[in-house]
Image (cartoon, rainbow, N blue to C red):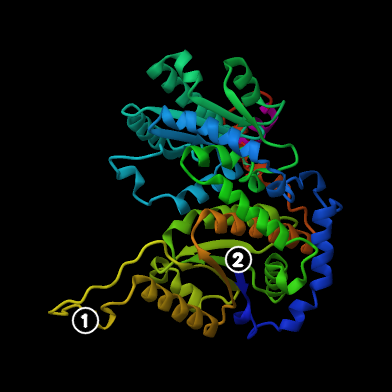
Amino acid sequence: MENISVDISNVFGFITRSTIEGLQNLVLEKNLALENKSGKGNDFLGWVKLPSSISDSDLKEIKATADQLAQKTDVIVVIGIGGSYLGTRAVYEALSHTFLHLRSKRQYPVILFAGQNIGEDYLNELMEILNEVRYGIVVISKSGTTTEPAIAFRILKNHLEKKVGKKAAKDLIIAITDARKGALRTLATDEGYKTYVIPDDVGGRYSVLTPVGLVPLAAGGIDITTLVDGARSMEIITSPDTSFNENPAAVYAATRYTLYRLGKKIEILANYENKLHFIAEWWKQLYGESEGKDGKGIFPASVDLTADLHSMGQYIQEGERILIETVVSVKTPQTRLTVPKDADNLDGLNFLAGKRLDEVNKMAELGTLLAHVDGGVPNIHITLPELNAFYLGQLMYFFEKACGISGYLLDVNPFDQPGVEAYKKNMFALLEKPGFEEETKRIRKRL
Ligand code: PA5
């Protein structure tokens, strides 16, 4: 059985192997701190052993509930933001058919998302579509008080109740939230919704393998058992018992930390498979929120290639030399397509005739990698043998483990996000939320 792999050979023009390997004891210490819960934020380390602690009966129960909802619906709207949204979207978009919503016959409902923006047109247009289909809602908020999903839920709950009646709506809504506290817990109890609990010791951005991700993904037809199996295997591979060079999370964390100390302040996650777009969005949240504090941290950015070679490619090749490029590459696509031969060859493409598109894509990838390294951008290359649930489970757990280690290398708490409160305070002051009277006065003076 192959596993995902990390190749750092294209950083050696910038830093040496011995500098990276020189960090191995420190990295092991940080990995042990995650394992033993002895580091910063240690009340949020439930994710470390999460894959191995999910039981088959948990998965069975989740699948049964998700199936029940799926059978009654054509569309499921997943309401959530940040860690209560991105993991689900990342896995769903990576593993489901790109044009599923246009198929006339579908085995599973289409998953749509709300609560991750406050756009008026977005929700209005969504409701126009929801008028025409049978739909259900999975509403997710750990705190149960986040404004964006709470607004979306208030609006869609009203919409659904008007459409099918309050009694029927109740059976079409699942709430995933804290066991005891928060407005969503109170609402779910009062209304009698089916609920799932987000464990206290798992923060939003590390929660994809809790009901946060598993319930909506199962409803959308994703094989959650295999996803969890992949994560379980990576939990073993990245444990402190594995030697440094055999542990991809240790190698990745040590390499990017060494590059950061060299002045590489931005890491770009690049994919050559469009379905990975939201994996990059999920990764950006994971690393941005975990590392970006106390004036420290690599800024996580992303590009979809080859599309962005025609835009951001210029900066990557010749802009300020503060970049690291990390490519997530899929070794073998699920389907085949070759370039046809053309008798007239007016486009001059007959030199590609008979070649698989993937071969063209891989040569674009290799050519770009070499050009960017030549241009001064160190490259880390992560390979997924295939884009399937098992390797996505591996990839996500690998990134989580490396992120925990990276945060500890930077000596920050990778499991809090105090910085996200600042905008909320201003927004509530501007909207005159009760309790924010002083802030309202202060902010009005500034305007
Ligand atoms: O990673 C995090 O903790 C955050 O991104 C949260 O997931 C996000 O703010 C949503 O919070 P909640 O689930 O409480 O609505």
Label 2, on which residue?
A: 3
Please state which amino acid type lies under the numbered disc 1.
Gly
Q: Where is residue 352 in the image (x, y as percent from the top left)?
A: 28, 80
Q: Characterize the magenta stretch by its predominant secondary structure.
A: helix
Looking at the image, which residue sits at the far left? 344
Q: Where is residue 137 in the image (x, y as percent from the top left)?
A: 48, 29
- Helix, strand or loop at label 2? It is loop
Do we see residue 69 in this rendering?
A: yes
Please state which amino acid type lies under the numbered disc 2.
Asn
Residue drawn at (74%, 77%), measured in percent from left and top? 20
Looking at the image, residue 375 lies above or below residue 164: below
Task: Identify the magenta region.
Answer: 436-444
Could you tell whether 307 is left or right of 181 in the image?
Answer: left
Could you tell whether 446 is left or right of 26 in the image?
Answer: left
* Mark 2 neighbour density, 10 Å: few (under 14) some (14–19) many (20 or more): some
Q: How far apart are marks 1 and 2 (CA)?
A: 39 Å
Mark closest to the chain's N terminus, 1 or 2:
2
View quadrant of ligand 1: top right
Label 1, on which residue?
A: 348
Q: Quadrant of the N terminus?
A: bottom right
- Helix, strand or loop at label 1? It is loop
Q: In which quarter of the image is the C terminus?
A: top right
- Determine which quarter of the picture holds residue 163: top left
- Nearest the eye: 303 or 47: 47
Whether 276 is among the magenta residues is no
Residue drawn at (75%, 56%), measured in percent from left and top? 294
- Determine which quarter of the picture holds residue 156: top left
Do we see residue 144 in this rendering?
A: no
Q: Where is residue 277 in the image (x, y as percent from the top left)?
A: 47, 57
Looking at the image, residue 77 lies above or below residue 89: above
- Nearest the eye: 13 or 295: 13
